[in-house]
Amino acid sequence: MNKSSAISERNPVRPRPMHMRRAGDAMPAHTPEPLLRPTPARPAPSFERDVMLGLTLRQKAIPATWLYDHRGSELFEQITRLDAYYPARNETRILEQCAAQIAEAAGPRAVVIELGSGSSRKTRLLLAALDTPQAYLPIDISEQFLAESVAELPSQFAGLRVLPIVADFTRIESLPELALIDGGACENGRRVVFFPGSTIGNFTPDEAIGLLKRVGQAVGPDALLVVGADTTQDPGVLLAAYDDRDGVTAAFNLNLLARINRELGADFSPTAFVHEARFNAEQQRVEMHLVSLYTQRVTVCGHPFQFAMGESIHTENSYKYSLLKFQHLAARAGWSHRQLWMDGQSRFAVHVLESSQAGALRERNVMIR
Ligand code: AVI
């Protein structure tokens, strides 16, 4: 769950009051602005609560967001460089080919908001194609990741204001930071939400609709949404990608047990569980599980949990969307189709959508002419 999903939800940080800045404050050249920490509208998720509750379920399950501690984020970066993990490579190829047309739809002086910004390589492709982008607001829960990934941007894109926001984008309901960049001498153009990496697939369809609705409300009317979604349904391709031969995805999944041991004083034996990727054809999703090799008892926060041999903890869903299914989902969230790009293998899609209201207006203009 930037990627997205996709992509993106890393080391949770304690929410602090939003850093105060005034609109139009002069910033030194080549410096990203200070990290903003908005006050979230909903209570912060808790690792302990999610793990303790998740281990009492009939199908034990822990939300995928907790896979991304520092080590988990490093392992995920390694996954994105694997030959077998096609989503990252195919999406980059699409953006290399189509960024110019996406930029045309965005128009001049765009303000780019990225959800779960991660390492920002794909962002550079988009920013480089845009006509004088005015501002870039990456939102990521990992302060360290955010700081590292934006450090070079102001020197690479002259005139671009960079306002990193340390937050869990899944919980954002408004973006008052946008007011900070409005009102300068030069009027800003369209707001462009960038959500690459198929992170959208790490939410259930209902969650994804809720998220895209909230994002639409937070960025306001006439926005553009550029979102990457995995379209692959071939179980062979999927299982090779989510259970790679080098064992990187296995290490990524098993790292969750090491995190629980370290942060919640648990006694999971890393060799008593194995990573398993399963394609759930009915739900059209890949699931990651940690499967217990034996009957065993594990203690977490002083509480015992029993595992039968073969019983699993479900740790991630990665939904795969046909083009129409995704467009239908987006429409239910208030976003309508504008452009669509696919790679040559037809495994991945970049959807360019716009607030339904903007789409309807454009439609009317076309009919009037
Ligand atoms: C972040 N997210 C989009 C990845 C995915 O493909 O669902 C996470 C991942 N899990 C295993 N490999 C990659």
Image (cartoon, rainbow, N blue to C red):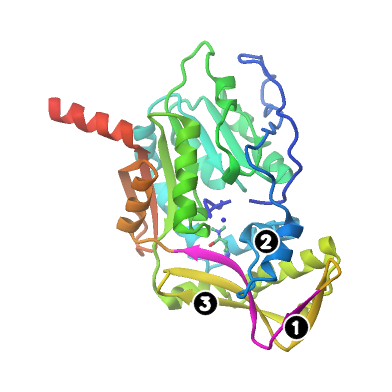
- Viewer-proximal residue among 150 and 285: 285
Give the percent coordinates (x, y) of residue 84. 52, 70
Mark 2, Cα crowd under 10 Å, few <14 / some 14-19 / many 20+, is many
Residue 116 in view of the camera: no
- Quarter of the image where ligand 1 sits: bottom right
As helix, strand or loop, the secondary structure at mark 2 comes to helix
Dot 1 or dot 3, earlier in sequence? 1
Q: In the figure, 23 relative to 13: above or below?
A: above
Stretch in magenta: 304-319
Give the percent coordinates (x, y) of residue 170. 57, 46
Q: Can you tell which mark lies on residue 278? A: 3
Dot 2 or dot 3, earlier in sequence? 2
Q: Main secondary structure of the magenta part?
A: strand
Disc 1 and disc 3: Cα gap in Å? 19 Å
Disc 2 and disc 1: Cα gap in Å? 18 Å
Identify the residue at image location x=63%, y=69%. 61
Give the percent coordinates (x, y) of residue 133. 49, 27
- Viewer-proximal residue among 81 and 188: 188
Mark 2 Cβ and ligand 1 under 8 Å apart: yes
Q: Can you tell which mark lies on residue 67? A: 2
- Residue at the disc numbered 1: 272
Is the residue under label 3 in contact with that under label 2 (CB below 8 Å)? no
Q: In the figure, 140 relative to 6: above or below?
A: above
Q: Verify whether residue 155 appears in magenta.
A: no
As helix, strand or loop, the secondary structure at mark 1 comes to helix
- Viewer-proximal residue among 295 and 317: 295
Identify the residue at image location x=34%, y=34%. 105
